[in-house]
Image (cartoon, rainbow, N blue to C red):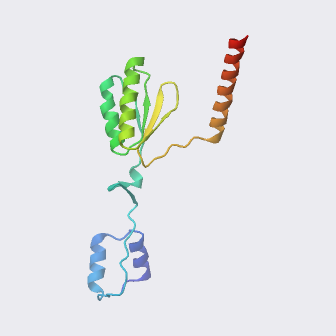
Amino acid sequence: MASAISKVKEFFGFVEEEERLIEKKSEPEKSTSPVVRSFRGSLLNNGVSKSLALSEIKIEEPRIYEDSLNIATHLRENTPVIINLKYLDSASGKRLVDFICGTAYAINGHMMKIGDSIFLFTPENILIAESGDKNQIDSIIEQEDKDSFLRRAVG
């Protein structure tokens, strides 16, 4: 009979598969006991298993438009990507962002502009949340810009 410690180890996934098989062979079969599956420390999303310890964010600084293929691959593999366009000219940067936006849209991902030439793209399972303070500051700045524009147009 398995001890309580062995059952706790098995529940949390600390028992190796071979040990579990040896213990089950030595125990008599019980047809009324439910099957307990252990947690292995991974998340399932769309049939893709990804370990919690392997989470990462890629930071890319593309130098040519063709680097967009590598960035799109990261997104398709459910890896968030921060893109800094400081090495690209304006036209190539716009094309690259358009391409990556299309990739993000295709995988139900998300996009957020962080700075002048810095963008964050995330796959479907990672949401981007802004703090409330930033939204308030942006709305105040936008309102001041509108007011100053109206003053110049009227005056």
Residue at image position (44%, 81%) is 4
Query: Picture coordinates of residue 116 (x, y %)?
Result: 51, 24
Quadrant where the image shows the C terminus: top right
Quarter location, residue 3: bottom left
Query: Picture coordinates of residue 62 (x, y %)?
Result: 37, 26
Residue at image position (31%, 87%) is 31
Query: Picture coordinates of residue 115 (x, y %)?
Result: 52, 28
| Above or below for 18 versus 108 | below
Of 107 and 146, nearer the camera is: 146
Outermost residue on the top side: it is: 155
Of 150 and 138, nearer the camera is: 150
Quarter location, residue 64: top left
Res. 131 in view? yes
Of 142 and 85, nearer the camera is: 142
| Above or below for 92 versus 104 | above
| Above or below for 128 versus 16 | above
Res. 89 in view? no
Residue at image position (29%, 81%) is 24
Quarter location, residue 121: top left
In this picture, residue 45 sits left or right of residue 119:
left
